[in-house]
Image (cartoon, rainbow, N blue to C red):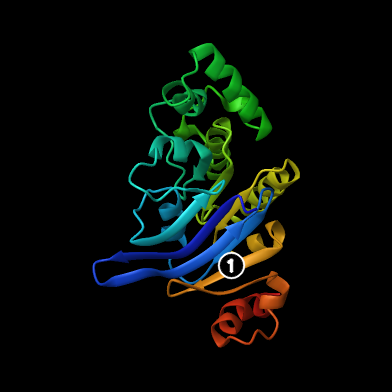
């Protein structure tokens, strides 16, 4: 049984159809990547799954429970889906430690001492324990990424979403992100990553979902998508990788 299952997902903004009948499934322990050109619907897809955007129609099931209905506990859903945002979304006026403990105290109901113990554990997991008293302005882009991940992991989510995790990072930091996500795979953390970065996709995932104009055009290993796929849209996008190797 799939941990997460999306069926016939549609999202429209006015007359524009951003997602046009998307289907995908993720099993526990999977690390899957969603790729596509700008405007293909990648980020909208993961925002719909955790209800940051409201789907127009379709089904989203987590642990075989429908999560698109009006009676769904949105707060509980978002505790089950960790989200690492493209721009990290850290609170500038809070320290690293307080950024991680905030949700644990206000959503998880932990006392401050319990929340700080859990936060320190997760910060150590991503090699950021020594920076816990710093503020976001004192951190590099890669360090902010790690804090955002620690915050997501602290809630013990069923799956972690990454939205373009390397878009604001230099090449060295991009390699660190791929190493970090591979460590999550070793730990059995389920991951869905939206990215335009072919190198990252190659290093972190066996299977890539390719979106074009809001539709899933292909799902396969990146090596297969890069070599003579029948769909010319897939050939054109993944042919970029062969050109830079």
Name the residue nearer the viewer: 63 or 181: 63
Position of 33 with respect to 215 (left or right) is right
Evaluate whether residue 173 shows in this view.
Answer: no
Can the viewer see residue 164 in this picture? yes
Q: Is residue 22 above or below residue 152?
A: below
Label 1 CA crowd tier, 10 Å (few <14, some 14–19, many 20+): many
Q: Residue furthest left?
A: 14
Report helix, strand or loop for mark 1. Answer: strand
Residue 78 appears at what percent x and percent y? 45, 40
Instruction: Examine the rendered structure and indicate whether residue 117 appears above or below residue 157.
Output: above
| In the displayed structure image, the side of residue 223 where residue 5 appears, left or right | left
Depth check, front residue: 99 or 138: 99
Q: Position of residue 161 (x, y in %)?
A: 54, 49
Question: Residue 102 in the image: x percent, y percent?
Answer: 44, 25
Quarter of the C terminus within the rendering:
bottom right
* Circle 1 residue: 209
Q: Residue at x 68, y 86 (%)?
A: 228
Compared to residue 90, the image places residue 228 above or below, namely below
- Lateral position of residue 186 relative to residue 66, left or right: right
Closer to the camera, 37 or 24?
24
Residue 170: x and y in percent read 57, 54
Residue visible at 57% across and 83% down in the picture: 236
Q: Quadrant of residue 140?
A: top right
């Amino acid at each position: 049984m799939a941990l997460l299952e999306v069926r016939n997902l549609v999202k429209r903004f006015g007359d524009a159809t951003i997602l046009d009948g998307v289907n995908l499934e993720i099993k526990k322990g999977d690390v899957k990547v969603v790729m596509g050109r700008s405007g293909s619907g990648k980020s909208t897809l993961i925002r719909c799954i955790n209800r940051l955007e409201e789907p127009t129609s379709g089904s989203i099931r987590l642990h075989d429970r429908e999560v698109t209905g009006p009676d769904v506990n949105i707060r509980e859903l978002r505790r089950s889906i960790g989200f690492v945002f493209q721009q990290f979304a850290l609170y500038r006026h809070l320290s690293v430690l307080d950024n991680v403990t905030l949700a644990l105290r206000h959503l998880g109901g932990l006392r401050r001492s319990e929340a700080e113990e859990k936060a320190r554990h997760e910060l150590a997991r991503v090699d950021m324990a020594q920076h816990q008293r710093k503020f976001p302005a004192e951190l590099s882009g890669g360090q902010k990424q790690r804090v955002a991940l620690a915050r997501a992991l602290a809630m013990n989510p069923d799956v972690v979403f990454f939205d373009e995790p390397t878009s604001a990072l230099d090449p060295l930091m991009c390699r660190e992100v791929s190493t970090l996500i591979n460590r999550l795979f070793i730990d059995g953390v389920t991951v869905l990553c939206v990215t335009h970065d072919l190198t990252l996709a190659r290093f972190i995932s066996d299977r890539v979902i390719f979106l074009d104009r809001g539709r899933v055009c292909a799902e396969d290993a990146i090596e297969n998508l890069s070599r003579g796929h029948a769909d010319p849209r897939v050939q054109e996008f993944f042919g970029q990788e062969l050109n830079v190797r």
